[in-house]
């Protein structure tokens, strides 16, 4: 195996570790979003709003919307890194197949 392929494999490992970190961050943000929304709903309920009105207000609360936008950006980064992993993986397979003369799977 060439030094270049070894370097690509190491890069792929690093990227996959980044994917795992991003996946965990996304899961934590999902939980944080639920808690944030529940807190906002609770505030509105304590102020006398009905459950339905409190839920509606929570969905349009600026802090909740900002949280969701940041989560969407993190999700986009996660998808980008996954795509980079797949492209690198394919490049490694192609390089190995070219060296061995076997077809790419």
Image (cartoon, helix red, strand yellow):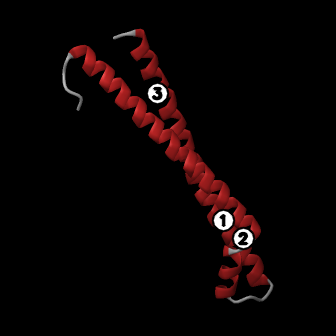
The residue wearing badge 2 is: 39
Q: Quadrant of the N terminus?
A: top left
- x 76%, y 68%: residue: 62
The x, y position of residue 32, in whole percent, is 65, 59
Tell me whether the residue at label 2 lies in contact with that at label 3, contact meaning CB atoms closer than 8 angstroms. no
Judging depth in this view, the residue of 80 and 12 nearest the camera is 80
In the rendered view, tell whether residue 71 sits above or below residue 87.
Answer: below
Pointer 1: what residue?
Answer: 35
**Residue highlighted by disc 3:** 13
Do the numbered discs 2 and 1 sit on residues whose CB atoms are within 8 Å? Answer: yes
The nearer-to-camera label among 1 and 3 is: 3
Position of 83 relative to 100 (above/below) = below
Front in this rendered view, residue 75 or 101: 101
Residue 52, position as x, y percentages in the image: 64, 87
Looking at the image, residue 27 lies above or below residue 20: below
Q: CA distance from mark 2 to mark 1?
A: 6 Å
Where residue 63 appears, x then y in whole percent? 75, 65
Going 25% across and 21% down the picture, which residue do you hit? 97
């Amino acid at each position: 195996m060439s030094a270049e392929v070894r370097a690509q494999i190491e890069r792929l490992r690093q990227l996959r570790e980044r994917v795992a970190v991003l996946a965990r961050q996304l899961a934590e943000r999902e939980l944080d979003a639920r808690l944030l929304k529940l807190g906002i709903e609770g505030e509105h309920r304590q102020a006398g709003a009905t459950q339905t009105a409190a839920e509606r207000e929570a969905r349009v609360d600026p802090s909740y919307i900002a949280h969701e936008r940041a989560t969407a950006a993190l999700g986009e980064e996660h998808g980008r890194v996954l795509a980079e992993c797949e492209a690198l993986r394919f490049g490694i397979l192609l390089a190995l197949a070219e060296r061995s003369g076997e077809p790419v799977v």
